[in-house]
Image (spheres, rainbow, N blue to C red):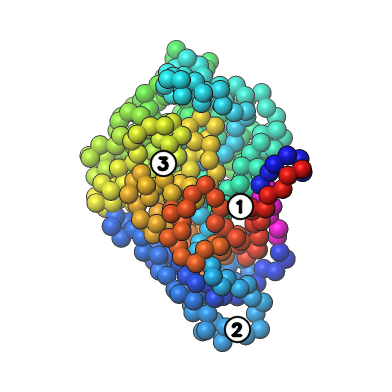
């Protein structure tokens, strides 16, 4: 190993059935998604234990009870540690080619994100790097991001296409995401984001690209998915970037309405820079989530709160763009909305894989308590990708996706940042030990 480095290595154990015991705090997050001011109910069991068998959680309770009931079970000692559900990251752009370090510097020198996009850079520059990359190269570039997510505690992530903006490349991205999901260990909820930007070929004809998406690409993706992902329970999500310079409200409605007719579950990028009404559209159409929500109006917040559409906040994005305004989380909670958190991991605005950093930002910039941030990053995040029946809490019947943190109190999450508090990740009952922090000079 050359140079100075702080490596992350992940070791996988072969034991899959076990009693994880003696957790200082076991956070169950039981009871389903947490709406409005109910957010932050961690269901803490002090001295807690979890029994894991066949990739699933069988029993949750006190260490004394579970050890007495299962004296011969292999054990994993979590003394001095917090045990909690794995993070669910419900908004990532995971798969792309190249990087935009140069644009970061341009922005620091005063250039604006939407101006760079209008000049053919931004998302479009990543589209150029993605179109010319092979599927092998795209997978190889995404894999370390996935491993960083996993090592920092994310056990399920949403992952979008959107840097192809032409049929062949968008399908290549879907194929790459399916391959990465099969490879594991992290599981992916996949989203088709052909409506991420106006394709460069349609620069002067945004309506033409919108029509291509609705008339040709969506039906094609539907048929392709049935052939290439036959065992999937449902179609991928369809998402739209509803924003000045991308898709206006009418175009977003056209795309999402067609997607809904074809049976796709929906998502939207709304109110990142301008308020176009995308959040209300998402609520009206029964979308799983509306994401970003920085300049969201009170009327949009009320519409979200009256719906099952999850408000997904992405605090890494204003942080990454060095902007002042964040999601009005307190207003969303006061109104009774379902709030979740995600990384938005992407090369333009927020190249960060760690949900722990998202929590630290949400506590400081949106006034969430650590308990609220944890619930927003687990059970509510699972609801935003329609997997709250499988992941996001420690309850019998759910997947054994959980974290052993190297801290005795959950409030270290949010409080500490820029470091990894995960000691072990358990994914479908397999234990992965994360060794971080040993430092060596060549
Ligand atoms: O969610 N806003 C649109 N999409 C991404 C940014 C993508 C990019 O700049 O490459 C986002 O912030
Ligand atoms: Fe995004």
The numbered mark at residue 151 is: 1
Segment colored magenta: 7-12
The numbered mark at residue 315 is: 3
The span from disc 1 to disc 2 (Cα, nearest Å) is 30 Å
Nearest to N terminus: mark 3 or mark 2? 2
Query: Dot 2: what SS?
Result: loop
Residue 50 visible within the image: no
The residue positioned 29% from the left and 37% from the top of the image is 296
Residue 294 coordinates in the image, percent (x, y): 34, 37
Q: Quadrant of residue 166?
A: top right
The span from disc 3 to disc 2 (Cα, nearest Å) is 43 Å
Q: Is residue 9 magenta?
A: yes
Residue 332 coordinates in the image, percent (x, y): 28, 47
Classify 10 Å Cα crowding around label 1: few (below 14), some (14-19), many (20 and above).
many
Residue 44 coordinates in the image, percent (x, y): 42, 70
Q: Main secondary structure of the magenta part?
A: strand
Up the image or down, 62 lies above or below 82; here it is: below
Q: Is residue 194 left or right of residue 178?
A: left
Q: Is residue 199 left or right of residue 8?
A: left
Residue most extreme to the bottom: 68
Q: Is residue 433 magenta?
A: no
Which residue occupies the foreground of this view, 233 or 97? 97
Nearest to N terminus: mark 1 or mark 3? 1
Q: Quadrant of residue 136?
A: top right
Nearest to N terminus: mark 1 or mark 2? 2
Quadrant where the N terminus is found in the figure: top right
Q: Where does label 2 land, which residue?
A: 70
The residue positioned 25% from the left and 37% from the top of the image is 297
Classify 10 Å Cα crowding around label 2: few (below 14), some (14-19), many (20 and above).
few
Q: Quadrant of residue 205?
A: top left
């Amino acid at each position: 190993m050359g140079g100075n480095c702080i490596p992350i290595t992940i070791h996988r154990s072969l034991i899959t059935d076990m009693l994880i015991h003696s957790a200082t705090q076991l956070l169950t997050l039981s009871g389903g998604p947490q709406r409005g001011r109910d957010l932050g109910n961690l269901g803490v069991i002090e001295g807690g234990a979890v029994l894991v068998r066949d990739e699933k959680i069988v029993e949750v309770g006190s260490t004394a009870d579970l050890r007495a009931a299962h004296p011969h079970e292999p054990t994993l000692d979590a003394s001095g540690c917090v045990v909690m559900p794995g993070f669910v990251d419900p908004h990532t752009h995971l798969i792309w080619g190249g990087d935009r370090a140069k644009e970061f510097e341009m922005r620091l020198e005063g250039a604006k994100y939407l101006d760079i996009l209008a000049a053919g850079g931004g998302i479009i520059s990543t589209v150029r790097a993605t179109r010319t990359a092979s599927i092998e190269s795209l997978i190889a570039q995404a894999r370390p991001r996935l491993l960083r997510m996993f090592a920092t505690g994310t056990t399920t992530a949403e992952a979008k296409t959107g840097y192809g903006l032409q049929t062949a490349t968008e399908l290549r991205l879907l194929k790459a995401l399916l391959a990465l999901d099969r490879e594991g260990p992290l599981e992916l909820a996949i989203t088709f984001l052909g409506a991420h930007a106006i394709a460069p070929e349609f620069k002067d004809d945004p309506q033409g690209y919108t029509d291509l998406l609705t008339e040709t690409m969506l039906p094609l993706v539907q048929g392709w998915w049935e052939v290439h992902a036959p065992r999937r329970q449902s179609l991928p999500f369809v998402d739209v970037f509803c924003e000045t310079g991308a898709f206006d409200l009418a175009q977003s409605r056209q795309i999402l309405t067609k997607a809904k007719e074809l049976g796709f579950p929906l998502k939207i990028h709304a109110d990142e820079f301008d308020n176009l009404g995308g959040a209300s559209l998402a609520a009206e159409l029964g979308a799983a989530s509306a994401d970003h929500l920085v300049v969201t109006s009170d009327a949009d917040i009320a519409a979200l709160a009256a719906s099952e559409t999850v408000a997904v906040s992405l605090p890494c994005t204003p942080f990454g763009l060095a902007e002042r305004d964040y999601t009005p989380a307190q207003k969303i909670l006061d109104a009774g909305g379902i709030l979740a958190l995600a990384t938005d991991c992407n090369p333009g605005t927020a190249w960060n894989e760690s949900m722990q950093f998202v929590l630290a930002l949400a506590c400081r910039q949106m006034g969430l308590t650590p308990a609220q941030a944890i619930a927003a990053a687990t059970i509510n995040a699972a609801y935003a990708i329609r997997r709250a029946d499988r992941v996001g809490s420690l309850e019998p019947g759910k997947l054994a996706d959980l974290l052993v943190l190297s801290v005795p109190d959950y409030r270290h999450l949010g409080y500490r940042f820029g470091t990894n508090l995960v000691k072990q990740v358990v994914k479908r009952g397999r234990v992965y030990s994360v060794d971080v922090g040993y430092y060596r000079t060549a």
